Image: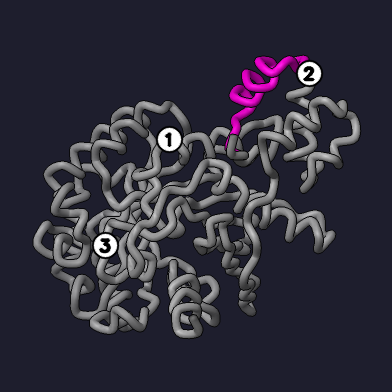
């Protein structure tokens, strides 16, 4: 039987598995503590776990499957990791430092099929979903990096905004949330976790019904169907007529604020007219809406797009504010390294192909 990641098991799932394999229930808490509090990297390090249980775990699970290929460090403290999976695929994970804590951006898929025309993540189509364990292991690897520095720092926030569409890997994403949020382990608060979707409307309904306090962000990037379809292929399947009712349902069901991500592309979607149209689109949601304006990180393969001018960004921002829409301009992190999501992975794959 093929081994799988121990990190892919929620506490309840591990409880069921271990008891079904003849272990006492208290062993689950011991194993969980060694994994997430003491953060061992080998089952043999679990000193108070009996040898029979250790052997059982070693025969069926692994702890480490990611290997670090590249680590880029920015002068602002941002670190971008390029990890290789067991099957040779590459993924990116990013550690960002803020005044409120340390945030990690995780990847949920190898490649992406959403096809946003401005995004480096979609340069290589989806190869497969990541398992829940592979997503959790990104957090654990970053935490191990922090532990080695011996500064008593911990990952306090998570954004699920890396390579891939999280809602296209829904079940594994939800298992990931349950593991990292568990108070017996990493205990990262639900309100400190944000997941971003490009607008899979049917999954937004499901997410609203989960009754969890994890934050939701929607990649909007355009205020009308014509423009959104031009820059985001997903809008063909989920146009605004489908997306906005799903968002209304989410807001009504959860009464939680939603963030709308809006990348500003020079002379494409950054005019005052688009700002006014966006304000109108969100007018009945303004009390629970926040628009995150994002300066574009240019990608070599998408050279038809340029970063909006500072003047255009300011005008867009002021227009939204004047229309009563809460908004802000994202503080940039890691601008002196391969900042765009998927950019480091894309460069490395091209490099490997060149030398093969």
Image coords of residue 353 (percent x, y):
45, 79
Kind of element beneath mark 2: helix
Q: Earlier in the sequence, mark 2 or mark 3?
A: 2
Q: Position of residue 275 (x, y in %)?
A: 20, 65
Residue behind mark 3: 115
Q: Do we see residue 311 in this rendering?
A: no
Q: Is residue 111 magenta?
A: no
Residue nearer the viewer, 286 or 34 = 34
Residue at screen point 74% across, 55% down? 144
Quarter of the view holding residue 211: top left
Mark positioned earlier in the residue sequence (3 or 1) = 3
55 with respect to 9 (left or right): right
Mark 2 surroundings within 10 Å by alpha-carbon count, few (fewer than 14), some (14 through 19), many (20 or more): few
- Could you say which disc has been placed on residue 26 in the image? 2
For the residues marked 1 and 2, what is the alpha-carbon distance in whole angstroms?
27 Å
Percent of width and height locating residue 335: 51, 78
Is the residue 61 above or below the residue 278 in the image?
Answer: above
CA gap, disc 2 to disc 3?
47 Å
What residue is at 50 percent from the left and 61 percent from the top?
A: 89
What is the span of residues highlighted in magenta in the rendered image? 7-24
- Quickly name the residue at label 1: 171
Q: On the rendered image, what quadrant is the N terminus found in?
A: top right
């Amino acid at each position: 039987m093929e081994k799988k990641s121990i990190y892919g098991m929620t506490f309840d799932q591990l409880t069921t598995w271990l008891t079904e394999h003849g272990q006492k229930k208290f062993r689950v808490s011991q194993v969980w503590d060694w994994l997430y509090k003491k953060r061992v990297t080998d089952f043999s390090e679990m000193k108070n776990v009996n040898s029979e249980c250790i052997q059982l775990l070693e025969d069926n699970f692994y702890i480490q499957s990611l290997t670090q290929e590249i680590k880029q460090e920015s002068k602002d403290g941002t670190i971008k990791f390029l990890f290789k999976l067991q099957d040779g695929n590459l993924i990116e994970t990013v550690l960002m430092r803020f005044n409120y804590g340390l945030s990690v951006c995780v990847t949920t898929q190898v490649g992406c099929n959403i096809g946003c025309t401005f995004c480096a993540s979609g340069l290589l189509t989806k190869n497969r979903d990541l398992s829940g364990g592979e997503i959790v292991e990104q957090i654990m690897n970053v935490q191990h990096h922090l532990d080695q520095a011996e500064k008593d720092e911990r990952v306090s926030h998570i954004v699920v905004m890396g390579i891939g569409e999280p809602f296209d890997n829904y079940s594994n994403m939800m298992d990931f949330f349950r593991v990292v949020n568990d108070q017996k382990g990493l205990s990262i608060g639900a309100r400190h976790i944000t997941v971003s979707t490009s607008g899979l409307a049917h999954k937004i309904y499901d997410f609203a019904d989960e009754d969890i306090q994890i934050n939701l962000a929607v990649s909007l990037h355009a205020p009308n169907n014509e423009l959104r379809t031009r820059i985001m292929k997903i809008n063909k399947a989920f146009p605004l007529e489908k997306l906005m009712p799903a968002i209304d349902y989410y807001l009504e069901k959860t009464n939680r604020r939603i963030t709308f991500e809006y990348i500003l592309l020079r002379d494409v979607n950054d005019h005052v007219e688009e700002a006014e149209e966006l304000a109108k689109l969100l007018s009945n949601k303004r009390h629970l809406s926040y628009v995150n304006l994002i300066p574009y990180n240019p990608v070599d393969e998408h050279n038809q797009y340029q970063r909006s001018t500072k003047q255009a960004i300011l005008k867009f921002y002021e227009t939204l504010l004047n229309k009563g829409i809460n908004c802000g301009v994202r503080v940039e992190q890691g601008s002196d390294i391969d900042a765009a999501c998927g950019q480091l992975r894309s460069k490395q794959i091209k490099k490997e192909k060149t030398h093969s």
